[in-house]
Image (spheres, rainbow, N blue to C red):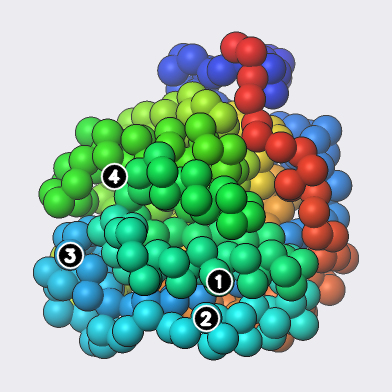
Amino acid sequence: MTSLPDFSTARPSREDISALFAMPLLDLVFEAARVHRAHHDPREIQLCRLLSIKTGGCTEDCKYCAQSLHHHSKVAREPMMKVDAILAEAREARQAGATRFCMGAAWREAKDGRAFDRVLEAVRGVRALGLEACVTLGMLTPDQARKLKEAGLTAYNHNLDTSERHYANIVSTHTYQDRLRTLDAAGKAGISVCCGGIVGMEETGQDRMDFLYTLAHLDPRPESVPINALVPVDGTPLENPRPLDAFAWLRMIACARILMPGSMVRLSAGRESLSAEAQALAFLAGANAIFTGDRLLTAPNAGEEADAALMKALSLVPRPPGKEEAAGPLRTHG
């Protein structure tokens, strides 16, 4: 097997990524496992919890999303949660072993005012509980990013979802450049970036390669890379996709691990539809974080009992808190 460049110190070229996609899958998984073991404890899995703090009524038209006003899903619009209720959920997550608590609001963009102030208060409360705090609020201004950083925010989630070429087929109410500007604002404020994508939205193999190229060239690099499998939702334009190719999903995880060696690669939405064996291969290929609990925002999730049983069967252990923050922003010199 031809040795690959060390992407912990260099940025990949498009040719590098094409070469990964051309590799036999098991060779690719083997290489990803080698990279993973060089940068992480392969037995450790970070447990995270994701809570929808403001559900439904989003003005964006993302074709996969149950919370869009443009679609006819059964997700009801709900007001933003009170801070006390959010922190009660955070305490429960901590009790269940989570070390990162993520809060999502169905907004096009964060707007200054009472709701944003409530988010800042929730971030401070989550940090006081000893948990890492992540939020996803839509687009941010640099000033909002600064305020979130001052409140103690650990990470900001803003997914690119897919390639720039395919993005216009998925969303029309904002642009890829809008997404990149928010990621830039978070990074410049000193907040770790959580940024990933979704497999199974009728994208091509080239789209997947282009997406990974963009992701691996963000500066700072994403501290966290969630790889989602599309969860079809009745009433959305993507309610009847082609069946998910679990091997394509696995290839994305392995490639993400190789291209971003120091990042956390997170198994996110859609995991409950995949077999225990497929998830085991994903952990072998370098995935080292999962979301626990019964729901991810409005989507179903595997549940704590199933996760505990899987981790026990694979001799995996929860990752101790604080490792990601101690590492700091992921930058390269390439």
Disc 3 target residue: 59
Disc 1 target residue: 122
Disc 4 target residue: 203
Tell me if label 2 and label 3 are in contact, CB under 8 Å.
Answer: no
Quick one: SS at disc 4? loop
Disc 2 target residue: 83
Q: Alpha-carbon distance for marks 2 and 3?
A: 24 Å
Locate the N terminus by quadrant. top right
Nearer-the-camera pick, 325 or 2: 325
Going from N to C along the chain, the mark reached first, 1 or 4, is 1
Q: Is residue 21 visible?
A: no
Nearer-the-camera pick, 233 or 30: 233
| Label 3 neighbour load within 10 Å: few <14, some 14-19, many 20+ | some
Three-letter amino acid code of the residue under disc 4: Glu
Tell me if label 2 and label 4 are in contact, CB under 8 Å.
Answer: no
| Quarter of the view holding residue 125 | bottom right
Tell me if label 2 and label 1 are in contact, CB under 8 Å.
Answer: yes
Residue 229, position as x, y percentages in the image = 44, 59
Tell me if label 3 and label 4 are in contact, CB under 8 Å.
Answer: no
